[in-house]
Image: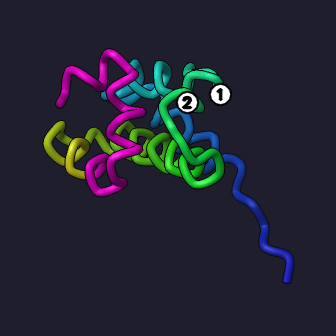
Amino acid sequence: MNEEIDFDQLFADADAAFNGEYKTQLNELMGLSKDEVDAITPNDTTDLATYYKLIEVVKHASKTNMDQASLISNIKTLGDIAIKIAKKVPTIATLF
């Protein structure tokens, strides 16, 4: 059961995310160091997973040019840890 990976589509999706409406926010979020994330999050494994989910939410928002209200709602859905991490990114913190 070898599933073929469509690298062209993967690259197109990545380009769309990194060139979309929230590209600055995405770059700043991904620029947080592990130490910065660890300082925000008390539970390493679970909270690091939340950080990666937050990145995916912002990537999706950027790729689809999601409106700010929807992005904020999606971040809030991830919970308090995601909100704390998001607020460490100045360009995302201004949305709250």
- Does the magenta-highlighted stretch encompass residue 87? yes
The range drawn in magenta is 74-96
Q: Quadrant of residue 11?
A: top right
Q: CA distance from mark 1 to mark 2?
A: 5 Å
Kind of residue at badge 1 = Lys
Q: Residues within 10 Å of mark 1 (few under 14, many from 20)?
A: few
Residue in view at x 36 percent, y 35 percent: 84
Q: Secondary structure at mark 1?
A: helix
Taking the spot 64% from the left edge, 23% from the top edge, the residue there is 35
Quarter holding residue 61: top left
- Please say if 72 is above or below 95: below
The percent coordinates of residue 91 (x first, y second) are: 30, 18
Q: Are marks 1 and 2 in contact (CB under 8 Å)?
A: yes
Along the line of sight, which residue is nearer the eye, 45 or 6?
A: 45
Image location of residue 40, percent across then percent down: 48, 31
Residue at the disc numbered 1: 34
Q: Amino acid at mark 2?
A: Val
In this figure, which residue is indicated by the disc labeled 2? Answer: 37
